[in-house]
Amino acid sequence: MKKCILLAASLFFSVLCESLPARSFDVLFPGLPKSSREQVFAQGGLIRSVESQKELLVLPAAGSGIDLLGPVLARHPNHCVEALALIPYTGSALKTVNLYNVLGKISSLKGRVYHSASRDKNVALFEEASRVSEKNGGAALPDLPDAAVLPASQVLYLRLKDANFGNTYYRADIRASGRGILYGLYNTKTITYMLFPVMKEEAFAAHLYLEILDEGVLVYSVAGADVSGFISSRINIPSAIRKRIEVILGWISDGIRQRMRASAP
């Protein structure tokens, strides 16, 4: 019975997401300055580190149904990163379930690089990346197989071997949300650096929203972390969060581009 209910819910959300007409970017983000809009449409998108809610630039229109800010600010972060990217179509228009399938390919996070200013070279951020069978450990699991129908929700546990912080563990909550997909990422175990605790369990939260628009695929993110002053004085936390969001954003964007190319006639 439970499986039948879940299947019915998945079919409902899949049909709902795919049947609604696509919206335009300017309807969702009408107040964005021209220079910022150009960054959004450029390779890599717009990514900004801010220290307070008042500095946030990327704010969806009222009535858009998109709220990433509330759940992140509920954790009282003292460091935030906002990001916004628009991936233009290079093939046929995708379906929302295609975006869900991109988010299930955790292993492809392995080896993605960021530029290390201290080393003056590109460094792999995640030396290993996989799903795991349970919170904070368990057996490594393969990537999710592609789904034909968009599930109403899905919870994944991840192990990411971080170049700076060693093994880190996260919970990924994926669910249909209005016209798109909401992807929530939370650390489920304290993150340490040289034995010092950097972020306590659930002190980091990244919320990403993906939606198929007229112009392409929208990827919008707000991330925040509550970090002690002692650690903040020794580690550049805004830079650390930004690098990880850049890598995750690049992972999603490249996955979407691959799906677009595969759908090209």
Image (tube, grey):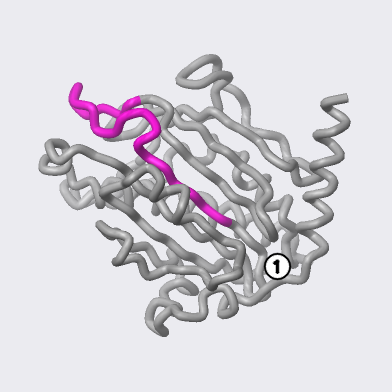
Observer-nearest of 147 and 64: 64
**Spot occupied by residue 195 in the image (x, y as percentages of width and height):** 19, 22
| Above/below status of 13 relative to 59 | above
In which quadrant of the rendered image does the C terminus lie? bottom right
Q: Quadrant of residue 82?
A: bottom left
**Spot occupied by residue 140 in the image (x, y as percentages of width and height):** 55, 20
Residue 134 as seen in the image, left or right of residue 15? left
Q: Quadrant of residue 20?
A: bottom right
**Mark 1 closeness class: few <14, some 14–19, many ≥20 residues within 10 Å:** some
| Above/below status of 162 relative to 79 | above
**Spot occupied by residue 218 in the image (x, y as percentages of width and height):** 57, 64
* Residue reaching furthest to the bottom: 34
Element marked by disc 1: loop
| Above/below status of 6 relative to 42 | above
In which quadrant of the rendered image does the N terminus lie? top right
| Magenta highlight on residue 167 | no
**Magenta extent:** 190-209
**Spot occupied by residue 74 in the image (x, y as percentages of width and height):** 40, 46
Residue 71 as seen in the image, left or right of residue 237? right
Q: Which residue is mark 1?
A: 91
Amino acid residing under circle 1: Gly
Residue at screen point 71% across, 52% down: 98
Residue at screen point 75% across, 58% down: 95
Residue at screen point 53% across, 40% down: 108
Q: Main secondary structure of the magenta part?
A: strand
